[in-house]
Image (spheres, helix red, strand yellow):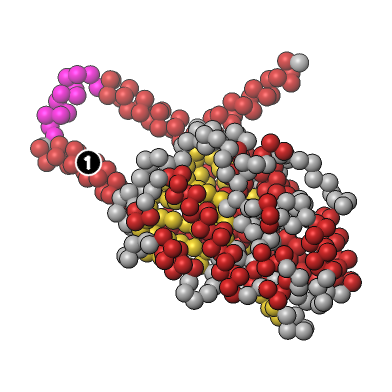
Amino acid sequence: MSSSVQPMRLKAAYQRIVDNFQSLVIVHLAAASLVALVRLGPEELTSLLRELQPVHLFFAGFLPAAAVIVYLMLRPCAVYLVDYACFRTPYTSRVPFATFLEHSKQSPTLNSRSFRFISRLLERSGLGEETCLPTAQHCIPAHKYCTIDEARAEFELVVFSAIDDLLAKTGIAPDAIGILVVNCSLFCPTPSLVDMIIHKYNLRGDIRSMNLSGMGCSAGLISVGLARNLLQVAPRGSHALVVSTETITPNYYVGNERAMLLPNCLFRVGGAAALLSTSPVKARFRLKHVVRTHTGAGNDSAYRCVFQEEDDEGNVGINLSKDLMVIAGKSLEANITRIGPLVLPLREQLLFALSLVARKVFRARIKPYIPNFSKAFKHFCIHAGGRAVIDELQKSLSLSDEQVEASRMTLHRFGNTSSSSLWYELAYMEAKGRMRKGDRVWMIGFGSGFKCNSAAWECIEPARNADGPWATSIHRYPVVIPDVLKH
């Protein structure tokens, strides 16, 4: 018994020393300086001070003070999440598997082989019976009703509902919003989506507005990073509204290419609005880091793994490559290489660095060391892009079932809502009452191109209740999701 306890104590002591190495060095240097001053004695110290010229004393006091002032002036402003709100999908828009399959069967363009593929895919998708589709896709045949007017109606329903909830929660007046960033990959009308929001809420004439499109499911974190950068050069206390959604009405694929049928089966209605500010007043989270990595430069397979194109019959759709998971894994590795030094304790950084040097410099045939990100984060929001995406990230990051629970339950309840899925996952954790002050959250998203983006948050004030997109269903979760769902 004692022989097994001793190594555990030594390991714990080693971890504490390494993780607090910087603090230990500073303490020892301060102690050594104090001892040196004490050894001088009062007479020697007085004599030393008398020998100093006034200019020496001036610089001794002025330079440190000037350095501190310059540092405070140049240091980027801290950015806070005041609050966020997700679209609450109406019960009347839900699409059970039986309904989805019946509508697919009635499609004049879908052959029997594609129908069987869709049926098998839904059984293994991880989606539940309460995911929702827009009004146009409840019609038969759906593609005839997927007009631009219906697409605008979907965007207005989802986004305006989320913004209304957000403004009600924060009490912020629309004219207090100085920055607006909207991301929606596949629907980009004229006037733009930001113009629709500005017109609806009568926002300021000098508002800085940006409309991001074509950037995939990770665009929500790109929007957060862009809003942060704009806030840091705006007057202190400014507010930025970030809206993330995917309007799926105009993107219904009517062909029979399997790789292009996947989005029809996985993507569902959803959207979120978040209010950021450089003022900590009423803030609920602090934004610690935003890290973006792009692996598509000179890499055709990464660039084309999520690609909008026409099939052989001229039908437009999104082609998801069979190499998507491999590319996502490499993109994740690139991202954790950058975010690791910012968030991980020193011990994990050393182990990761030693593994990287052994593989890259000495060509050692060893597996890459995956840092234990549980040492840096309490909660994980992994993009709910599909069961395979969640499985791959859980394996790559060595996460427990509980740590990926929010992602799996979000996929089951809401489906793949693209860039807004991360906010539904955060809402799940808060609805479950798991968020505590000081907890750190890691959001990870993947997008076309190919991109892996992540953001680190620190909780300041947890939600006081479960009001939000999970209000009517949180009591039923978590649920057991079988490998193959029989219906």
Task: Indicate left or right for 383 with 179 as reference.
Answer: right
Please report the residue visible at 41 percent of the width from the left and 28 percent of the height from the top. 28
Quarter of the picture holding the N terminus = top right
SS class of the residue under badge 1? helix
* Residue type at tag 1: Ala
Rendered location of residue 218, percent (x, y): 58, 60
- Find the magenta span and give its range: 40-52
Q: Quick one: 329 or 367, which is closer to the camera?
A: 329
**Residue at left offset 19%, top offset 38%:** 61
**Where, by quadrant of the figure, is residue 151 drawn?**
bottom right
Q: Is residue 404 left or right of residue 458?
A: right
Which residue position holds label 1? Answer: 65
Most frequent secondary structure within the magenta stretch: helix
Residue at image location 83% in from the left, 74% down from the top: 110
Q: Which of the 4 image quarters holds residue 178? A: bottom left
Look at the image and tell me whether residue 319 can be seen.
no
